[in-house]
Image: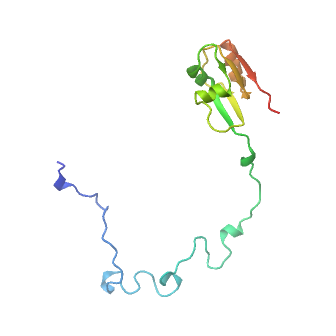
Amino acid sequence: MLNLHTIQPNPGAKHRKKRLGNGESSGLGKTCGKGHKGQKARSGGSIRPGFEGGQMPLHRRLPKKGFNNTRFQDKIITVNVSQLDKFFEEGATVDENSLRAVKLVQGQCDAVKLLGSGELTKKLTIIVDLASAGACEKVAKAGGTITVLSKA
């Protein structure tokens, strides 16, 4: 039975504090586990991360070449037809502003792309920057129209 006077920490959760320099029989006397002399035995003696004892460090030995295009890529936000079915009524016009109003598009973006995941049961007029073939097919099947804006 669990009572206040029977609560104990898990086995191994509490340790005795390491008491350095308390005689040879303590196991951590004399050099206190730092060995004999040298930079790491001195007070304040520490080396920075990545230092290899004067040898050319790895981060300087590796070649620095190549190009990463991520900062120049267009940010495309995707919206599925099932989301449109959930958030819009029959006959509504769906564009970037209306998508922002229902919080399907947030933040900065270069384009909005419609994807064909899910089902569309409502007749909608959709204006987006990009659309997949499956999404266009589902919109047409539901009786709606889709306008894909040409990006120059």
Q: Is residue 82 above or below residue 25?
A: above
State how the image is colored.
rainbow
Q: Residue at x 72, y 19 (%)?
A: 146
Residue 126 drawn at (x, y percent): 69, 20
The residue positioned farthest toward the top in the image shown: 143
- Closer to the camera, 23 or 111? 111
Left or right: residue 113 versus residue 37 is right
In the figure, residue 19 lies in which quadrant? Answer: bottom left
Q: On the rendered structure, is 8 left or right of 122? A: left
Name the residue rendered at 32%, 86% in the picture. 23
Which image quarter: residue 53?
Answer: bottom right
| Count of numbered tags | 0
Whole-percent x and y of residue 40? 51, 81
Placement of 33 over or under 116, stated as above or below: below
**Is 112 positioned to the left or the right of 103 in the image?**
right
**Residue at 17% across / 50% down in the picture?**
3
Quarter of the image where the C terminus is located: top right
- Residue 21: image quadrant is bottom left
User: x, y (%) of residue 37?
Assistant: 49, 88
Q: Residue at x 51, y 81 (%)?
A: 45
- The percent position of residue 61, horizontal first and vertical second, equals 71, 69
